[in-house]
Amino acid sequence: MSTASVANHDAAHDHHDHEHHDNFVTKYIFSQDHKMIAKQYLVTGMFWALIGGFLSILFRLQLGFPDMDMSFLRPILGGWIDETGKLDPTFYLALVTMHGTIMVFFVLTAGLSGTFSNFLIPLQIGARDMASGFMNMLSYWLFFLSGVIMFISLFLKTGPAAGGWVVYPPLSALEQAIPGSGLGMTLWLVAMTLFIASSLMGGINYITTVINLRTKGMSFSKLPLTIWAFFLTAVIGLLSFPVLFAAALLLVFDRSFGTSFYLSDIYIGGEALPNTGGSPVLYQHLFWFLGHPEVYIVLLPALGITSEVISTNSRKPIFGYKAMIISLLGITVLSFVVWAHHMFVSGMNPFLGSIFMFLTLIIAIPSAVKVFNYLTTLWRGNLIFTPAMLFSIGLVSFFISGGLTGIFLGNSAIDIQLHDTYFVVAHFHLVMGAASFFGMVAGVYHWFPKMFGRMMDAKLGYIHFWLSFVGVYLVFFPMHYIGIAGFPRRYYSWTSFEFANMYTDLNMFVSVAAIITFAAQFIFLFNFFYSMYKGRKATLNPWRSNTLEWSTPLVPGHGNWPGEIPTVYRWPYDYSKPGAEEDFIMQTVPLSATPESNLPHEQEMVKLELEIMKEEEDVMASNATSH
Amino acid sequence: MEKELKYVDMVEQPIAMHPKKFGLWLFLVTIVMIFAGLTSAYIVRQSEGNWLEYDLPSIFWFSSAIVIISSIFLQYAYSSAKKDNLMGLRIGITLAVLFGLGFLVSQWYSWVALVDENVFFVGNPSGSFLYVFTGLHAVHLISGVIFLIIVLISTYRYKVHSKSLDTLEMATTFWHFLAALWLYLFMFLLLNH
């Protein structure tokens, strides 16, 4: 009897959740509802994407038009434009640094994982909310605070951090090195510490929720690939962000307390610094132990979203569901053993280099499996080209073209020539930058109806897609040639090099393409905010999709499902099943309800399923009478 | 009938573990990664040479003993709570806290011993690393002490007993973890010195 009363108590508690009323502050600001937190992450991510994109336009202007008079930017940049209308060279370094930091961490980590892990994990696994709503809220507000500090650093007199997004010491450790290594760097470190804390809180929540709060029947072999991707992303973050914290901590001690973890034998203005015995390569090891997994923290959620969107809009089961999971696992494991391929030219032992080269090239295998499975899912499907679908296909395209150049860069010998050139810039912008960005945008188009109960405008979506897709290639494809020609990254100008003259046009072309691509994002912004209020009302399951989130009310309240949480009976990819009435069968439909489409082994499972359902009904009935 | 009700328990709660306890374990993983990062950094840096050799403060043996005793007291508190022995619970936690504070004092004297040896925080990384290891561990231990004091206060509100052990259990896990972490660091330093 005691068990029955416990079960009843739980039900009563769940019920209580729905009657709970929020005021403005607890609903929109200090919300503990995972859906609201997801929207907060999304809007904050979009804000940072605008800032990050704008910074890139500024340095593209400098690169494409080195002789341009930039006086018109003085209202924004003030003293960073000198009397002759030229951009300040140290500020140029700050621009590339902040562009990288903002895009990698604030947009593609927090904006992507924060939005979709928060939004989709409880909805797709059938949970009322995250394991700890409070910690989830704290995670967002730490991220927000981190953003505020980073934002303030943009307006410092000495400028924000300028040592590159990797902030290698000694450049970042010594205030005398560049203006950006002063207060700007301090604020960078403070902001990143808060960001790490925020990511870890989020990650702990995602993992706990996926493992402990799945609904009845939702086994790991029935999880949508989105959840697999978010789950493994959180695992990667949990293991790698603490190491970045360790690296940053030692850097803080070197900067502010006079220790010599990374500093040794440095002369400034003929004067020797007291620091001896440090090793700058040590920082690189620690940094890239996070830095490389970070690439997959950025990419995996986008790949997960793509799996879901491509399968739904091809009206076909995802090809190789298990192979997809194994590839994700493979990428997760491999991501931790390849970090030194960022350091081939740091003077490391060439033998060690060849080991890391070998491990790096192995990553091509799970990546290729994923690409193959996307293409075979698309193959002969009943393709529906929604904007989300187009962006997902765009992601696959970038993943292929950017991934191929990774094979070159992963070779320690070829890397000597290509290291720190625009070839690298082109590679990672395609494979992780643009690909993840497209995954994120695809996710917004696809789940907008669930977020706001309205549809985004498809026509504007198509225009946005084609301008972005063509634009991204026009920006980054020429960079391969510029890189092979030997243009190093992070250089303010090449006008003093003879060989650079013949590439002036190409750089100009890239800059114009970048401006057009950036401008195209405003179409998306307009579409987003306009559709939020004025968009066409969505139906309950607009994409005719299988996963659990589409079984909630149009705008789900806190707790997601008004009654009981639905039970899951099948995997999420029963699209176009032969014999079925419709071309999709939701996860909540029992096998016993679809005898016409069951495969022989599923027919076997029907018996078991019926038995379990009968027992449950008995229990319900006995509970009701005992109550 | 009784059998069927057991079944309800099984399907209604697919939760493998208390979510907060699980979250705590994940938090411990992050701490492990921080120290794994730092201790590997120590090895990598040590292998590059120019490494100051000095004697480890012998007081570390003493702090290790204290931290183990503290853990034993907390384990005693936990088993008392299981038996609803409120007095034993309070005494156990109090002693664990006192020995925890004793550990912190002992760690402080290890720093004094290092300074006496002319090993400073600023200087060769060999010494700086030791300060970082002990300091960062102490910061975590202080958070553990605060956690224990919160649990101690809640025992006076009769919130910790054999039917409500979750918080105490989490505090115990964290405290044992911190003791084990210190023992790992000490062993590591003994072996790589």
Image (tube, coloured by chain):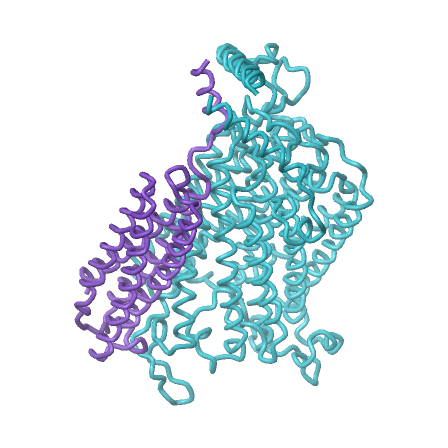
Chain colours: A cyan, B purple
The percent coordinates of residue A72 (x first, y second) are: 76, 75
Instruction: Check the image and report above or below for A518 versus A184.
Output: above
Instruction: Check the image and report above or below for A543 versus A467.
Output: above
The percent coordinates of residue B7 (x first, y second) are: 45, 20
Residue depicted at 53% across the width and 50% down the height: A135
Q: Is residue A363 visible?
A: no
Which of the 4 image quarters holds residue A498?
bottom right
From the viewer's side, name the closer residue of B170 and A333. Answer: B170
From the viewer's side, name the closer residue of A585 and B92. Answer: B92
Please state the total of marks drawn on the protein image. 0
Residue depicted at 54% across the width and 74% down the height: A184
The percent coordinates of residue B142 (x first, y second) are: 37, 62
In the image: residue A6, left or right of residue B56? right
The percent coordinates of residue A475 (x first, y second) are: 64, 57
Instruction: Check the image and report above or below for A202 versus A191.
Output: above
Residue depicted at 36% across the width and 72% down the height: A262
Residue depicted at 28% across the width and 55% down the height: B179
Which of the 4 image quarters holds residue A29?
bottom right
From the viewer's side, name the closer residue of B139 and A298. Answer: B139
Instruction: Check the image and report above or below for A141 versus B83.
Output: below
Q: Is residue A134 visible?
A: yes
> Which residue appears farthest toward the bottom when viewing the image?
A270
The quarter of the picture where the C terminus of chain A appears is top right
Which of the 4 image quarters holds residue A283?
bottom left
